[in-house]
Amino acid sequence: SDDLTIRPALPSETALIVGHRRAVFSEICPMPAAQLEAIDAAFAPWLAARMARGEYLGWFGTNPAGEVVAGAGLRIMDWPPHMWHVEPRRGNILNVYVQPAYRRGGLARALTEVAVAWCRQNDVRMVILHASDAGRPVHTPLGFAPTNEMSLIVDADPAASDGA
């Protein structure tokens, strides 16, 4: 919408980013408050350190009153040369969040486009993101496509936890 603007996030605004991430997780996979609080407590210092080093950039969508109503982040990751690119950095767009009252107005798309434009201007040629069901229709028209990535959560030694 023409009455909403996008601006860079400041290092002093990590609490807003933490809140957006918490809201994303709450919507995608409801979990107990204690688990969300543990995530927040671990994420806040991680975020602050990466913002200070320029490894995490953020943008906010604001309404005419200047209130932050949306946000998105970009993590710049060191990455080995790959079959799709040889540049030593990869972008990871994350924490895309829009308050419910401002959804379906193009803010998520605009924030993603700002992050991709930053990558283009800074020679980051590979950009990834993990899209929720609601996010896929936003990101697919921008050229994002599924990949063959798989994941595994490595727990503690199962023998140690079963009393053996």
Image (cartoon, rainbow, N blue to C red):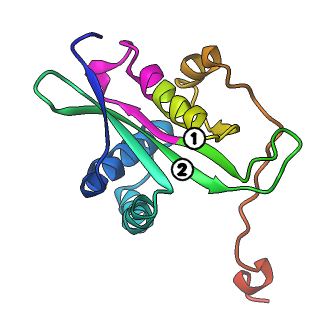
Task: Say which residue appears at 29% left-offset and 19% top-offset.
Answer: 102
Query: Which residue is labeled 1 in the image?
Result: 122
Task: Say which residue appears at 30% left-offset and 56% top-offset.
Answer: 11
Q: Name the one closer to the observer, 27 or 1.
A: 1
| 148 displayed left or right of 143 | right
Against 57, is 108 above or below? above
Residue most extreme to the right: 83
Query: Which residue is labeled 2 in the image?
Result: 75
**Secondary structure found at label 2:** strand
Magenta stretch contains residue 45: no
Against 41, is 132 above or below? above
Residue 155, image x, y percentages:
70, 71
Q: Name the one closer to the observer, 146 or 47.
A: 47
Magenta stretch contains residue 97: yes
Q: Which amino acid does label 1 sit on?
A: Asn
Q: Give the range drawn in magenta.
A: 94-111
- Sort mark 1 into few (<14), some (14-19) or many (20+) by Cα contacts within 10 Å: few
Task: Say which residue appears at 62% left-offset and 38% top-offset.
Answer: 130
